Image: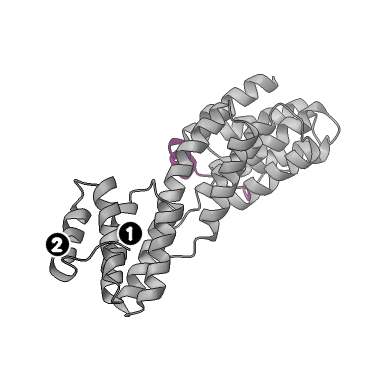
Amino acid sequence: MTTKLTTRLSRAALMGAAFATLAACGGGSADEDVAFVARDVESLYAEAQRRLDQGNTQLAAVLFDEVERQHPYSPWARRAQLMSAFSYYIARDYNKAIQNAQRFLSIHPGNKDAPYAYYLIALSYYEQISDVNRDQSITEQAQSALREVNRRFPQTEYAADARLKLDLVADHLAGKEMEIGRFYQRSGRWLAAQLRFRNVVDDFATTSHAPEALYRLTESSLALGIPEEAVKYAAVLGANYPGSEWYEKAFELVEDHAAGVTAS
């Protein structure tokens, strides 16, 4: 039963967007008129599963919680803990999904479903990543949780997906650094801007933002009166991204404002 549970959960998590749509369309809520009277564990678990299959994810989560509350020492309670976390995730109640998955891990740290619990925590943070114009603390939590999945379970399908998502998270964080750096440039705060652009080059060199960061460093170095630094950044840009539009722009800047200067 547990193996089937893991297979079903992992497949569903990897199809998160589709299930999220199902949850949104399924209707129903945990406030639905259902009396939580004492019931035998199998029928209670089956009812929770039935609600989940119908797309009534919030109520399913509450019913899975009831399995554990009414039958805390049964084998069903362990399964219900993880199913509850999964149901909250599909319902987009990410905080409860994280809480329940973390509680599952605290009680059953060596359980064979632990990799999925770690993965579910990471997904719950990942789904909350906001646009680059907002605070990125959730993005950093997602990055940390995804790294934990990859560190603990590197050979699993969860780690493979975590690595893909880590690339997207890095690109997102780099985008935030770029957005702040450009703001500082517009404000004439060139040193502060340079710090942000160097962060991108040093910490997010493999992201899509690296070429622009090097161009902005060329630009800000000229503004600060350090043409040799501008030449250095333009040369790095040309060596790594020779066909980039950012290199073409950097080359023109150097030609216009630092011709004959050699890199320091």
Marking on residue 213: 1
Rounded to the nearest angstrom, the CA distance separating label 1 from label 2 is 16 Å
Task: Give whichever of discs 1 and 2 has the lower sequence position.
Answer: 1
Write down the residue under mark 2.
252
- Is the N terminus in the top left, top right, bottom left or bottom right quadrant? top right
Instruction: Report whether residue 211 is seen.
Output: yes
State the residue lying farthest toward the right.
73
Residue drawn where x is 69% and y is 49% of the image: 99
Residue 218 in the figure: left or right of residue 18: left
Report if the CB atoms under discs 1 and 2 are less than 8 Å apart.
Answer: no
Instruction: Report whether residue 44 is seen.
Output: no
Which residues are drawn in magenta? 17-31
Was residue 21 drawn as part of the magenta stretch in this picture?
yes
Vertical placement of residue 178 versus 88, above or below: below
Residue drawn where x is 63% and y is 25% of the image: 6
Marking on residue 191: none
